[in-house]
Structures are given as structure tokens and as C-alpha cells.
Amino acid sequence: MLGRNLYLKSGLIALALFTCPVPKTFADTPRQQLQGTIDRVMEVMQTIRSVEDIERNKALFRQILSTRFDFAEMARRSLGSHWHNLDGKRNEFVSAFTQFIEGSYLGQIGSYRGEGIVYGREQIDNNYGDVDTKVVGGQGGPIAIRYRLHLVGGQWKVYDLVIDHVSLVSNYQSQFSRILRNASLEELLRKLREKREGKEG
């Protein structure tokens, strides 16, 4: 069953994206491209004053997220070995997964309370890179978030996040596998859509 911890983790991801303005520079490393995305988000966030502002800017937020997140790769990794059993429904699953993730992010925009990001180590190994960050300034201690990216057509795309040493993709994979042991793909798609709409699974 898709648990509330998915919303918690998604909220942390949104927090890491919707904070900390950075210099505007041409970027060609994972860290620089990630910071460039955050800078674009912050430009929009500074115009948000109400729920109506959030609604008006949802399409723009989705566009910005799509430039930095490889939702198809995240969906494939989250489904694990079940990916090969999708037959002709891969596009349908990727679409439902993407809308679920985006909905989780967008639902957290209004919760921003001035937290910031501290950037740490960047590691690059051929076409893969990791960027360590910490969310600071909120309630409780710092929250460590590692972005895992791969190079696609000259762009560094996020395919996983490790939040306080827990992989988001591994977390999804575990929950999806539990569902698919006793239910069909259609049932999983239904649960994703329900969670996107804020319903209890």
C-alpha cells in the first residue's frame, strides 16, 4: 500500500527544489545544472502570494521539473523487474508515475518557510553524478539529500534521491512490489492516481 511516507519524502524533495537562490551561470556539471533549476524555481516562487498564484503557476513548475527530472527512468527503476512485464502499458505507467510525483511536489509549495540548501560534495563518474545537499533552517536538524543524476543529451537528469540515507526509488520499488504480489498493474495505477488526488490508498 502506498504509505504516507511517500508524501513526506516527496515533500522533502520539493523543499530541496523550492529553496536557496543561486547565481545565474551557464552550467555543464551536475551541481551547476541542478542549481540552475533551483534558480528558475525561485524566480517563480518569489511571485507566489496565494493559493491562486500556485494554481496559475503549476504548468510552469511542471515544465521546470521536467527539464531536470528523468521521470521515465525513475519510473523504470521504481518498478524494478516488473518493468519487463508491462507489455504495451509502459507509457501509461510512466504518465501515472510522473503525475503522482509532480502532484506530490506541487502540494508542498505552500509549506515553504524560508529553509535553505547547503551544497556539499559533487561526484562524477562518466555519465553519472551525485550531488550532496542539506536542507537547513527548518524545524529539527538538517536533512541530507543526495541527488543522483545521469547525463542525457547533454543534460544532467535526476533519476533518484537519497534522503537521510534512504533511496526514494528503492522505497517506491519496495512498495510497488508489495502491491504487485497481490494485485494487478491496473490496481497499482489506480492507487497512484488516488494518491495524486490526495485520497487515502
Image (cartoon, helix red, strand yellow):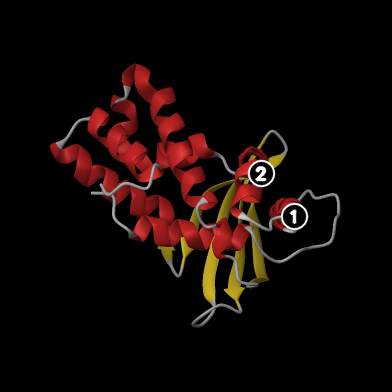
Where is residue 131 drawn, in percent x and y? 62, 61
Q: CA distance from mark 1 to mark 2?
A: 9 Å
Q: Earlier in the sequence, mark 1 or mark 2?
A: 1
- Quadrant location of residue 81? top left
| Residue behind mark 1 | 47
Where is residue 43 drawn, in percent x and y? 77, 54
| Residue behind mark 2 | 57
Instruction: Pick the residue in front: 1 or 106.
Output: 106
Query: Which amino acid, mark 1?
Result: Thr
Given the current orientation, which residue lies at the most extreme top position? 88
In the drawing, does residue 194 fall left or right of residue 49?
left
SS state under label 1: loop
- Quadrant location of residue 183? top left
Instruction: Pick the residue in front: 179 or 190.
Output: 190
| Residue 86 tag number | none
Residue, x 44% and y 24% (percent of image)? Answer: 91
Label 2 neighbourhood size at 10 Å, few (<14), some (14-19), many (20+)? some
Tell me, yes or no, if residue 9 can be seen here: yes
Query: Which amino acid, mark 2?
Result: Asn
